[in-house]
Image (cartoon, rainbow, N blue to C red):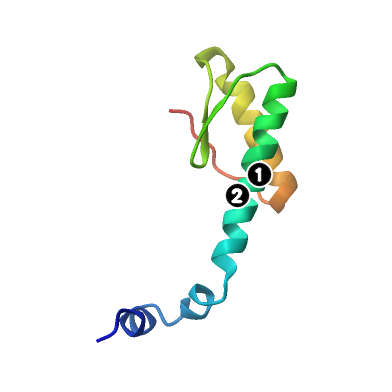
Amino acid sequence: MDVLKAVEQKHAAIYPLMTSGIGMQLFRKESDILVDVLLTLKTQRITALPIHDAVVVRDDQSEKAKAVMLKVFKEHTGITPDVTLG
């Protein structure tokens, strides 16, 4: 059985989304959010290293970075995300 057919059978409810191009739109949105987070942190003189969908900052700046991530994500999406420190 062809892989796409197997995925379609297993995940019929979301299969149309998988072939709609929405993935690329979501990748772009995530990218825009992270860039805005980094630029906002820069204005606050916080150096951040981006890693996928996270940023690495000094321990003493982690709460400020978390607040920025929450604010920027909500501005872009209207949704308040879960942000964890680790």
Q: CA distance from mark 1 to mark 2?
A: 5 Å
Q: Quick check: 43 above or below 9? A: above
- From the viewer's side, name the closer residue of 38 and 78: 38
Identify the secondary structure beneath mark 2.
helix
Q: In the image, residue 29 lies at what x, y percent?
A: 64, 53
Task: Please rate how many residues cluster around mark 1, counting C-alpha atoms within 10 Å: few if below 14, some from 14 to 19, many from 20.
Answer: some
Q: In the image, residue 21 lies at what x, y percent?
A: 57, 71
Residue at image coords 48%, 41%: 52
Identify the secondary structure beneath mark 1.
helix
Residue at image coords 64%, 18%: 46
- From the viewer's side, name the closer residue of 27 and 71: 27
- What numbered label is drawn on residue 61? none
Q: Is residue 14 left or right of residue 68?
A: left
Q: Is residue 3 left or right of residue 38?
A: left
- Position of the C terminus, as image quadrant, is top left
- What numbered label is drawn on residue 30? 2
Residue at image coords 58%, 17%: 61
Residue farthest to the left?
Answer: 1
Q: Which residue type carries mark 2? A: Glu
Q: Which residue is mark 1?
A: 33
Count the marks: how many? 2
